[in-house]
């Protein structure tokens, strides 16, 4: 049985997927399974969802999938850590250092009892989700390894953290405006600028807003893993910046916020459109 610590996991067999299917077809199947689990209130940290996120990050992208298939065909001794690395960064670690895996008994096909998926034949209507899923099949307990894969929060949690941060920022800016005795336009200007500084400042200098820190998450460069630059943070917060513009700015910001919220879904690897523009991601802190 393949588990989160066994070498050379075969994602196709583990998840009952047809290797001849396209990356787009596999991505839709995996995303639907993850969405079903999320609707059952199963957290991101659950082993089933972690495995689905890894499988999606690799098999739903043509370049990552080609790299994985080549490694699979070459019988490289890959681990789940290596697959997480591939899903996050698009490449494998230095595979030249890996010895070929030793011959092993043929792995059990579809060990987690996922419904098998075969792409539709020409002339048949494509219905990749026709078979019911059996998510409660025996799934091995997840055992932490040396490199923890990226654990990204879903749209609901991110919305909750944003609202709490907004409340905290409002309390700070309101108190500051009252202390300065500002009213009217001056009060609005102070609230807008200090509120913007709250989000950009904490993100650039500490790696996340206070509420994200409280919940154990950070905002980092998706390529280097470092804190965001001021330019990157401004791109992520573009809708807050444009909200400063009176009138039309608020309307554009509202529409942008809705679009961003919708874009945070498993099909996009839980990376919002604003994250992608800035080259950023929101992930759980190491060791949390």
Image: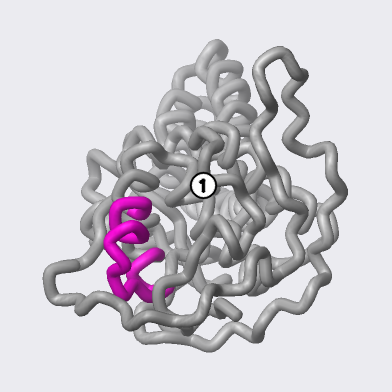
Q: 196 and 229: which one is in front?
A: 229
Identified at 25% across, 61% down, the residue is 92
Q: Residue furthest left?
A: 96
* Residue 122 shown in magenta: no
Residue 68, how many percent across, how many down? 35, 54
Identified at 59% across, 83% down, the residue is 142
Q: Residues within 10 Å of mark 1 (few under 14, many from 20)?
A: many
Residue 197, how many percent across, how many down? 37, 47
Image position of 152 (left or right of 158): left
* Residue 80 shown in magenta: yes
Name the element at disc 1.
Answer: loop
Q: Report if residue 167 is visible in the image.
A: no
Q: Report if residue 172 is visible in the image.
A: yes
Could you tell me what secondary structure mostly forms the magenta stretch? helix
In the image, the segment drawn in magenta is 68-83
Residue 4, how many percent across, how many down? 52, 78
**Is the residue 9 above or below the residue 141 in the image?**
above
Image position of 92 (left or right of 59): left
Identify the residue position indicated by label 1 in the image: 269
Point out the image quarter for the N terminus. Answer: bottom right
Q: 104 and 156: which one is in front?
A: 104
**Is the residue 277 above or below the residue 106 in the image?**
above
**Is the residue 184 above or below the residue 27 in the image?**
above
Image position of 2 (left or right of 190): right
Identified at 53% across, 32% down, the residue is 24
Q: 111 and 64: which one is in front?
A: 111
Residue 14, how many percent across, how many down? 60, 64
Count how many numbered circles sit on residues in the image.
1
Q: 202 and 70: which one is in front?
A: 70
């Amino acid at each position: 049985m393949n588990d989160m610590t066994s070498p050379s996991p075969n994602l196709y067999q583990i998840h009952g997927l047809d290797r001849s299917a396209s990356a787009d077809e596999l991505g839709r199947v995996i995303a639907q399974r993850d969405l079903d689990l999320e609707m059952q209130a199963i957290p991101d940290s659950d082993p089933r969802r972690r495995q689905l996120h890894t499988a999606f990050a690799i098999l739903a992208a043509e370049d990552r999938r080609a790299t994985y298939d080549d490694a699979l065909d070459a019988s490289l001794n890959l681990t789940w850590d290596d697959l997480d690395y591939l899903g996050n960064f698009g490449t494998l670690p230095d595979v030249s250092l890996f010895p070929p895996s030793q011959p092993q008994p043929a792995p059990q096909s579809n060990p987690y009892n996922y419904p098998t998926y075969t792409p539709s034949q020409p002339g048949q209507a494509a219905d990749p989700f026709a078979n019911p899923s059996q998510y409660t099949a025996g799934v091995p307990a997840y055992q932490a390894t040396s490199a923890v894969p990226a654990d990204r929060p879903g749209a609901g949690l991110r919305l909750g953290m944003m609202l709490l941060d907004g409340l905290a920022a409002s309390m700070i800016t309101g108190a500051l405006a009252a202390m300065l005795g500002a009213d009217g336009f001056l009060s609005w200007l102070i609230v807008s600028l200090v509120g913007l500084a709250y989000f950009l400042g904490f993100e650039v200098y500490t790696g996340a807003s206070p509420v994200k820190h409280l919940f154990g998450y950070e905002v980092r460069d998706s390529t280097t893993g470092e804190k965001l630059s001021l330019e990157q943070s401004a791109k992520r917060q573009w809708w807050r910046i444009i909200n400063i513009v009176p009138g039309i700015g608020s309307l554009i910001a509202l529409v942008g916020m809705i679009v961003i919220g919708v874009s945070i879904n498993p099909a996009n690897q839980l990376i919002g459109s604003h994250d992608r523009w800035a080259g950023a991601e929101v992930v759980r802190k190491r060791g949390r």
